[in-house]
Amino acid sequence: VEAVAEVVDSDQEFPLTAVGCVEYDAQQFGGDIAKIAVLMRGRIVRVPANYDPETRTYATSGAGTSNGIWDGTFKEAYTNNPAWVCYDLALNPYYGLGHRIDATMVDRWNLYRIAQYCDQMVPNGMGGMHPRMTCNIYLQKQADAYAVLQDLSNIFHGMSTWDG
């Protein structure tokens, strides 16, 4: 046996937080602390039901569509599209503005167009292609939710405004 894993069902110390643990023999690193790098995918957020975040495509038929266009429904998935990250922050009651605003106060139809713009593939300057805009941030400290929303909107050259 090379490894054994134990799953313990208990109250969470850090709710809504991913926690990782690495155990190693310090002798293998000359008694020093090992440098650890992690490839992390962030939160699962609401995205359009016709959106495939892996391919960054928006279907015109099937689930989430009506007569070839998005029907306004959502599913949950990982994405680094800044428009959908902003939508999540705007509506999440735990760490966003969801205790003050609801989905009827956010223009999801224009956000959909913004998200498509962000997902357009453009040259990366090295002969390949990459999405026009992505959001791969790690929020580490508490800040004013509206200010963070403004900063996230800046990723796609947008601006959050109150229209009500």
Image (cartoon, rainbow, N blue to C red):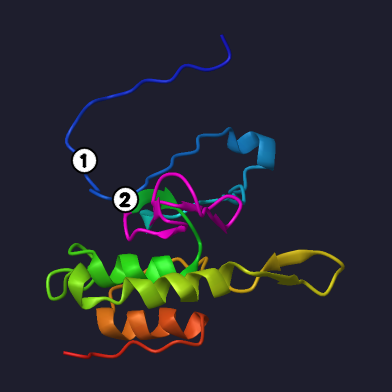
Numbered label attached to residue 17: 2
Q: Residues within 10 Å of mark 1 (few under 14, many from 20)?
A: few
Q: Which residues are magenta?
A: 48-73
| Residue wearing tag 1 | 12
Q: Is residue 115 rendered to the left or right of residue 11?
A: right
Residue 94 pos. (x, y %): 19, 62
Circle 1 — which element? loop
Q: Nearer the viewer, residue 101 or 151?
A: 101
Identify whether 144 is placed above or below 95: below
Q: Residue at x 51, y 62 (%)?
A: 80
Residue 104 pos. (x, y %): 19, 72
Asked if residue 139 shows in the view, the reply is: no
Q: Residues within 10 Å of mark 2 (few under 14, many from 20)?
A: few
Real-space CA distance between mark 1 and mark 2, rounded to the nearest whole angstrom: 9 Å
Circle 2 — which element? loop
Asked if residue 151 shows in the view, the reply is: yes
Q: Residue at x 33, y 54 (%)?
A: 74
Residue 133 pos. (x, y %): 59, 73
